[in-house]
Amino acid sequence: MDIESADAVVPAVDDRGEIEGWLRRLGRKVEPGDLKPGWAAIGMRWLLEQESGFPWLIEMKARLCEDGGLSGRQVSGVFNCWRADLLAAPQSSRDRLVKPARPEANLRLVPSGRYAVRRPDGHVVFYQVERGRGRWAGYIFLCQVIGGSRLQYVGRVAPGRRYRGPRSGDLSKVVQDPEGAARLFGRELGVCAVCGCRLTDDGSRRAGVGPRCAQRLTRILARYGARAGRVMQ
């Protein structure tokens, strides 16, 4: 049985990078005949650097230290452990670094007003959407409604842009059904989703909007629906 020595060849500076690229591309286990001259020594030096608790690697490391080398089959086993280590590391790195993309909300399709979203866990979150005036014309400002009346700033949307900031998942649901979101706001808080006045009769509370504002809401949403049609074309 031929024994390869860890000191047989002094590797070139960039040999290890070449080997790691080859191991990632290989697509199968390493066989003894796959290794180029000098690669066995590099693999054994890789083994000596490892602090792995894997029993087979511990045994190979001890044998290398005692005998000064390993058989060709044992060296290929070391390379297969090296390959497994390389293939595992990039995946865990991607899992840590890549975040799911936030949904974007085209708030140009939503009129100024009050909206609510019921999340999958049943929790209802309340928002107010306002269009800027004067020097802020074209901007859209977003606030979360806390405690029924207090406004907490969430973010703003520049003219011609879509919203991708905090709460974009909630706000994309408002875009999908602004009337439903407006009426949910009124039903949950007992105030008109259009004008903000308290709803005093059962019919209005069930509708989430006062009788006069119901007609206004229909007209506004119809206008934005027509605009949505133009935007989507």
Image (cartoon, helix red, strand yellow):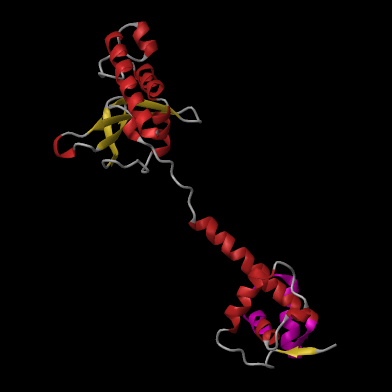
Highlighted magenta segment, given as a residue range: 44-72
Residue 78 appears at what percent x and percent y?
Answer: 72, 77
Q: Quadrant of residue 42?
A: bottom right
Q: In what quadrant of the picture does the C terminus appear?
A: top left
Q: Quadrant of residue 49?
A: bottom right
Residue 86 appears at what percent x and percent y?
Answer: 62, 69
Residue 169 appears at what percent x and percent y?
Answer: 43, 37
| Residue reaching furthest to the right | 1
Tell me: residue 39, above or below residue 172: below
Q: Quadrant of residue 168?
A: top left
> Is 55 inside the magenta-drawn segment?
yes
At x 32%, y 25%, the residue is 224
Asked if residue 143 shows in the view, the reply is yes
Describe residue 203's horizontal placement relative to residue 45 as left or right. Answer: left
Give the total number of marks visible in the rendering.
Answer: 0
Describe residue 198's horizontal placement relative to residue 7 as left or right. Answer: left
At x 31%, y 22%, the residue is 223
Q: In what quadrant of the picture does the N terminus appear?
A: bottom right
Per the picture, the main secondary structure of the magenta-coloured stretch is helix
Tell me: residue 178, above or below residue 205: below
Asked if residue 126 shows in the view, the reply is no
Residue 44 appears at what percent x and percent y?
Answer: 68, 83
Tell me: residue 98, above or below residue 74: above
| Residue reaching furthest to the left | 134
> Is 227 inside the magenta-drawn segment?
no
At x 36%, y 11%, the residue is 205
